[in-house]
Image: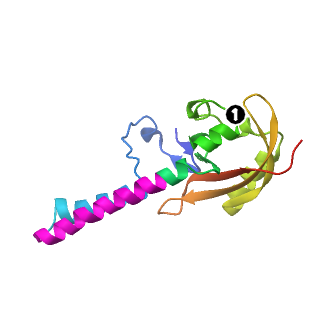
Amino acid sequence: ESKMVHGKTVPAEFMNLKAEIQVRTFMQHAWSTIHQDYLYKPDFRIPDRIQRQFFRTMALIEEVDEGFKNAVESSINAIGITDLEEKLIYVNNSCVKMWGYDSKDEMLGRLLPEFWEGEGVYKTVKELREKGVASGEDIGKRKDGSLFYVQFTRNMFRDATGYPAFIFGSFLLSFKTF
């Protein structure tokens, strides 16, 4: 029988199929496309100097990609990414520290509402799904159960077809205290 998955009807015959999924950054995807179309299987011979330029471009793409990853990882802002079911799939070190955990692994795979106090998180999720963005202040709950005020901004990221792909959040400690 068909089943709804992410708001789409999936026929029963596809429900138990296994697939390989490649996870790549935008820069890796760009390089892959260039390489496949122009270097790996070109319809014509690419001059050596142009090939060298492609490889220099790839080196720059790798540098930008690494720089972006390093910037996110070393940000003083806590950064978290969830899938569409609000399960944490990425947190940076600042996020781990803000919520009082010892490692990323303690947070990853858990549902976002586990890290918040009260019903505010559900209102935020609703707003995010309706508008694609939500910001404000809410009450975070640390590993030890202590509460703290958090300013947040969350954005829904969409894939090339416009379908929601994941949710990005940036968090700062508020000046308010309990």
Q: Type of residue at label 1?
A: Gly
Residue 60, by quadrant, is bottom left
Secondary structure mostly seen in magenta is helix
Q: Residue at x 11, y 68 (%)?
A: 48
- Highlighted magenta segment, given as a residue range: 45-69
Which residue carries the number 1 mark?
100
Residue 59, by quadrant, is: bottom left
Nearest the viewer among 77 and 14 is 77
> In this image, 143 relative to 139: left or right?
left
On the question of residue 159 being in view, the answer is yes
Say whether residue 103 is left or right of residue 68. right
Question: Which residue is pictured at 72% across the width and 30% down the height?
Answer: 143
Out of 84 and 98, give the one closest to the viewer: 98
> Which one is in front, 104 or 110?
104
Q: Is residue 76 above or below residue 97?
A: below
State which quarter of the image contains the C terminus. top right
> Percent from the top left, x then y, of residue 72?
54, 52
**Residue 7 placement (x, y as % from top left):** 59, 50
Q: Residues within 10 Å of mark 1 (few under 14, many from 20)?
A: some
- Give the residue at x 77% y 46%: 122
Residue at 69% x, 50% y: name it: 171
- Can residue 46 be seen here? The reply is no
Is 9 part of what is drawn in magenta?
A: no
The single residue placed furthest to the right in the displayed view is 178
Residue 158 vs 20, above or below: the answer is: below
Q: Position of residue 114 (x, y in %)?
A: 72, 35
Task: Say if the magenta span includes residue 65.
Answer: yes
Q: Is residue 52 above or below residue 94?
A: below
Which structural element holds mark 1? loop
